[in-house]
Image (cartoon, coloured by chain):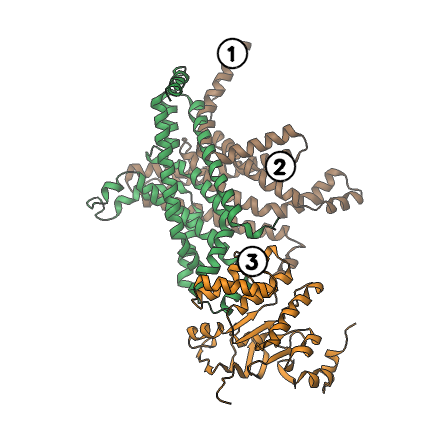
Chain colours: A orange, B green, C brown
Amino acid sequence: MAATPIPLEAKGIKKRFGDHEVLKGISLQAQKGDVITLIGASGSGKSTFLRCMNLLEQPDEGELIVHNETIGFRATKHGREPADWKQVERIRAKLSMVFQNFNLWSHMTLLENVIEAPVHVLKKTRKQAIDEARALLDRVGLLDRADYFPTQMSGGQQQRGAIARALAMDPEVMLFDEPTSALDPELVGDVLKVMRDLADEGRTMILVTHEIAFARDVSSQVIYLHQGVVEEVGEPADVLDNPRSERLRQFLAPKH
Amino acid sequence: MEQLNGWFTELLSGNLIFTANTLSFYWGGLVTTVQLVFLSLLIGVILAVPLAIGRGSKRRWIKLPIYAYTYVFRGTPLLIQLYLVYYGVVFFDGIQDSIFWVVFKQAFFPALIAFTLNTAAYTTEIFHGAIKNTAKGEIEAARAYGMSRKLMMRRIILPSAFRRALPAYGNEVIFMLHASAVASVVTIMDLTGAAYYVYARFYAPFQAFIFVALIYLCLTFSIMFVFRRLEKRLLAHLRPRA
Amino acid sequence: MIDLQGYGPRLLEGALVTVELAVLSLILAVILGLLTASAKLSRNRLVHGIGTLYTTLVRGVPDLVLMMLLFYGGQIGINMLTDQLYYAFDIDIFINVDAFVAGVITIGLIFGAYMGETFRGAFQSVEEGQMEAARAYGMSPLLAFRRVRFPLMMRHALPGIGNNWMVLLKTTALVSIIGLTDMVRVAAEATKATHEPFLFMIPVALIYLLIATLSEWGFAKLTKRYNTGFGESSEWNN
């Protein structure tokens, strides 16, 4: 049990914006190969929780352990802050995030986007990074778009490119923040297909999504958040097909 | 070459103003203007990069002095700044005894200092605006991929900001070329100085000033051309692919 | 009253010249700018060409060179003209080019070109639907311009006018070179006489800053007024 370290563990995460407490103590444990899906209405705190895991938001309370390494915090007059930003940078490099709005760097071609962090953060050689990047672009079906700039690609292509960028970090855990929400409906399928492949090959993934059917298919665990609290948690069959609370039942009911 | 020379002499023999002598004045003026403008722009950019980064700092003791500097230098005429440096430089204790006096007693260096400080102020604001406009999501992605502040500035923020600043900076270069005409006021024989000399000597304002205006026009168009090319290359990412 | 070695009153007079020059040039520039914008939007190719030539020439040549050309050349040009009048019609007049008038005309001419670009962009940004609506409600072309197009255009033009004004204000310093006694000229003369550059140049710089700061404040107020009906939506975007 202790032999394989747990890729990501969050304990009792709390976060407030001003007077509003967005997360009221949420915990999660991602074992290797887990696909954990966070669902909930907008404002439930699911994206904030995801962003706390790679410290794009600073949790006010709680503990984060990535691959046996606990992130240290110190108290400042502005609230709690990471004690060692170098540690944060090291840990972020192990947790690749895929954003709702892709956030590809607009002044770089797709290939340059994919090799940027491997070369400058992981200090890989340019040649090695390019070889790996081309293989990844091929995998997401974008090898012919390697020299395109982000604005020259469709949303679906940009998101698949962003997934290739995330994979190039060879991450411990992949974080997906509503990766299909900004896409036209006809482009969603390609992105979901790439994500399903990743789940099938045993990637550890945590994702925030509105695609309930997809969540049912790929998740090992589904967490339903409501107003900053875990309302229901369990295997997709339990949570999604036999919701216990009225609120989740309503949330899952087909929208008109 | 021989033929060309003969043709040229013939052309010049017909008029009294544009002799080889005055043309060499204009040529000297052109060289001085280009040197003055190029050097001040170059040093100005080097100063403006750290200033622009500091201008966007959260720390007030860094950003406020920089803002005060750009506010003063952008809010007052370059001519005043030139006068202040040109007449004020002797007030630096001991400068007249130091080895620097050899260069400072010429008007070129006070002018270079004034121009540099002026263009650095404008350029700082141009870069600051461009840095501020970096897409939030791109910065977030850089953080999410483990980049340090420094790396992010060097690899993500500045390269994309410089590209966005290019059109505004092109205007600043042209502005500086035109503004450099005031150098003639402190005895510098730049293009305008040469034109004024020719005007005063022959009392021929139209020839003297229209000729120099045409030279400035050519310079302006050359600068515009260079920046168009640069924009085409460096802003390719903003255009749809054909 | 600060004496400044006896130069104080003259410096103040100079400041007044600077302000008068700037304001009169601005008025001329706005008029020329509106004409230029109309010319550049005209379908008549000759008119369009003249407008383009004017803005291109002015924006390609330093202000100071244009000023010298108009001031020194203007005198000779007018002399030639009056000579012609004398020979042809026996009309004997002499017109002396006044530095102030030359200054207003040059600066007005220069900034007319910049204003032209500002107004052209602003005119184009008014949606045709707005004018169609005005016509649909029976407004005459003039009334529609005055009540609909002009206020809408001003919203887009104001930032540009503000920028041009700030640059124009600083450009007035150049008239000191062609001999007009504005505050820069007074300060330059005082500096040469007393070798006290800081004593004279810094107050002048401060007056420029004061005018610039007041203008900025004034333009902010104006912008707020012309942004009626647009302010809320832009707040939402932030």
> For mark 1, what is the residue?
C86
Looking at the picture, how far across and down is residue B146, in whole percent? 47, 69
Q: Nearer the viewer, residue C3 or C131?
A: C131
Looking at the picture, how far across and down is residue A184, in whole percent? 69, 63
Q: CA distance from mark 2 to mark 3?
A: 45 Å
> For mark 3, what is the residue?
A146
- Do the dots labelled 2 and 1 sit on one chain? yes
Q: CA distance from mark 2 to mark 1?
A: 38 Å
Front label number (3 vs 1): 3
Q: Amino acid at mark 1?
A: Tyr
Q: Residue at x 26, y 41 (%)?
A: B103
Q: Does C41 appear above or below B137?
A: above
Front label number (2 vs 1): 2
Judge whether residue C37 can be spotted in this image. Answer: yes
On the picture, is A168 further left or further right than A185? left
Q: Residue at x 37, y 28 (%)?
A: B26
Q: Amino acid at mark 3?
A: Ala
Res B88 quadrant in image: top left
Q: Is label 2 in contact with label 3 (beta carbons under 8 Å)?
A: no
Chain letter of disc 2?
A: C
Q: Is label 2 in contact with label 1 (beta carbons under 8 Å)?
A: no
Q: Residue at x 59, y 29 (%)?
A: C50
For label 3, count other residues whose C-alpha is less than 10 Å away and answer few (under 14), some (14-19) or many (20+): some
For label 1, count other residues whose C-alpha is less than 10 Å away and answer few (under 14), some (14-19) or many (20+): few
Q: Amino acid at mark 2?
A: Ala
Q: Which mark is residue C37?
A: 2
- Do the dots labelled 2 and 3 sit on one chain? no
Q: Does B24 appear above or below B72?
A: above
The total number of labels drawn is 3
